[in-house]
Image: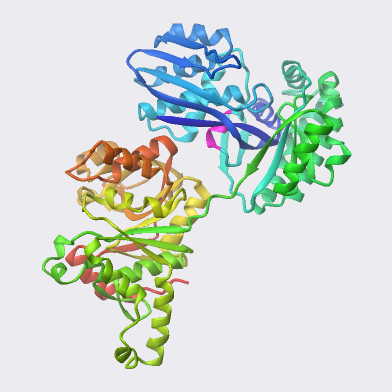
Amino acid sequence: MDIFVPGRICLFGEHSDWAGSYRRINASIGKGFTLIAGTNQGLYARVKAHPSRLIMHSTPGENGARQSLELPMDREALLDEARKGGFFSYAAGVACEVMTHYRVRGLEIDNYKTDLPIKKGLSSSAAICVLVARAFNRVYDLKMTVRGEMEFAYRGEITTPSRCGRMDQGCAYGNRPVLMTFDGDCLDVEELSVKKDLYLIVVDLGAGKDTVEILNRLNHCYPFADGEVQRNVQKYLGEISAGITREACAALREGQADRLGELMTRAQREFDRCVRPACPSQLTAPVLHRVLDHAALKPYVCGGKGVGSQGDGSAQFVARDEESQRRAMEIIRRDLGLSCLGLVLRTGRRVRKAVIPAAGFGTRLFPATKAIKKELFPVIGRDGRIKPVILAIVEEALSAGIEEVCVVVQSADRGLFEDFFGAPPAVENYNKLSAESRKYNDYLMDVGRRVTFVCQDVQEGFGHAVYCARDFVGGEPFLLMLGDHLYVSRRPESCARQILDAYARAGQSVVGLKVTGAREVHHFGCVGGEWREPERLLAITEFREKPDAEYARAHLAVAGMNADEFLSVFGLYALDPAIFSYLAEHIEHNVREGGEFQLTSCLDRLRQEMGCMGLVVEGTRFDIGLPESYRRALTEFSQCPVQS
């Protein structure tokens, strides 16, 4: 199993994590607000279970040499290693915490690559801790959420000599920006989306700072201030920093590089005014200010500030655009002789393509399917027209913003579908159409130009059908729909649009869900998990194909739901293209379930390795592969309002 964990950069709100924790003693102290983002660089590792030991191999050094840790999974041995400090102490500390709370065996971690600068305010130690927590979680399927991984990473790191703040483990959330709120012992985390790509630069100042001294001096200002200097520190790390950070979140959401840069410059100015007097030996930071004030950079950057605990460690800038980022980095290297790296806060990858498997025989609709494909069965559309099911599904995809649609068909049936979407009626029939129907035919031909067909020559299961579209999808995320499902939304947004919007918010794969009673769960794939948004967005911790009611009650109950209600798969998915590599492994090694290559187990692996969310879709599906459901679709589908 491969795992990548990025570093993290504190964009705004440095020191407010530990400052806000003092509210448990002095409630007049303001809450801490910190805005962080993951870096492009990080730690790469391959992990696997070990029967009894913790084994970790470090990234090769400049001379190609590697160091290794090997310890028994024994609490005292792990604690002894953690207390020594150094690279391997973090792994030992987290392993100790995990084994204290879970029944796990050992773990082998090969940290084969690290491109994250060390000791530059980018939380390299926290990344190690998150890596180990995530490795245990995924290898042993502990069903931790990202928040849980972050918590165990924090617990593990504080067993070492490192005295990190609570924000460092925010790298667990990947490269999406995250707002963290610190109120005494309480921590809230909000993931943010970015409307427009933003280009940052992180500069290694090549100097030095004493972080221990900085933290020591600033902690003397808490929990109760004594004198103007200490009051100013509390004011900055409270209300001033909170206000700037909230403004920065708004600018980030809108992709406003200019505004974000202005706020960085203001934050540095206020930090110097309020906080520098508490530790002038470390926070005067002449190298930092020389870089921030370098005139040649001004045309290319919107503003900048120090990183992390501040001082002469690292600086960060907001570049005006991608080309400005490149030019500014050239100037930093050429004029100042300093190393730097570029960081991009990207919008979520837009889903442009949809895949619709339509190669099944339709045994439950026999003998009708001997005469006509079930995907070509007629339904009365919401616009009043009688149309084949496949057209209604394609229209659902296109109305949600999908640009290209791939329909997976049998070779023998390809001509049927191509004729429908690509060939007009014979001239003598076309001339019999009303003007309105001729116009609709033009629309249908336009839809057809956006539909591609690929063949599934042998029907070997749902997973195999999806795999047939791998070349069409390429390396993009995609929307997966079912060729025998009609979808009707109860919201202004279509069901497919709800899924795509959730994908944009979550930044990871999303599976549509519906509430299902215990008597029906054995018909469907089902999930368990923890709510991110109550009764709406779920962090999935388990997929189970057609569980019985007893299993569902024991393993798939979700907080807040009725005792005999569970969440089953709705039939809409926004998936990361990594799903194809898991399907390929099953096909290559002939891993079958019920004699076929299925999708559910690959979805569960996607969940373990990359995370997966579930969205309770506000809508209804009609499975026209079932006679009774098809009958309902004939009478009810046309009565549903047309979605805008």
Task: Please report the residue visible at 86 percent of the width from the left and 26 percent of the height from the top.
Answer: 286
Q: Is residue 557 visible?
A: no
Quadrant placement of the N terminus = top left
Q: Nearer the viewer, residue 465 or 19?
A: 465
**Residue 396: % across, % down:** 40, 67
Task: Please report the residue visible at 22 percent of the width from the left and 46 percent of the height from the top.
Answer: 546
**Residue 153: % across, % down:** 51, 24
Q: Is residue 377 left or right of residue 439?
A: left
Q: Main secondary structure of the magenta part?
A: helix
Q: Is residue 170 magenta?
A: yes
Which quarter of the figure has residue 635?
bottom left
Task: Please report the residue visible at 54 percent of the width from the left and 37 percent of the height from the top.
Answer: 174
Magenta-colored span? 169-174
Task: Please report the residue visible at 20 percent of the width from the left and 45 percent of the height from the top.
Answer: 596
**Residue 3: % across, % down:** 46, 30
Q: Is residue 134 left or right of residue 186?
A: left
Q: Is residue 368 magenta?
A: no
Q: Is residue 366 left or right of residue 338?
A: left
Is the residue 53 above or below the residue 417 in the image? Answer: above
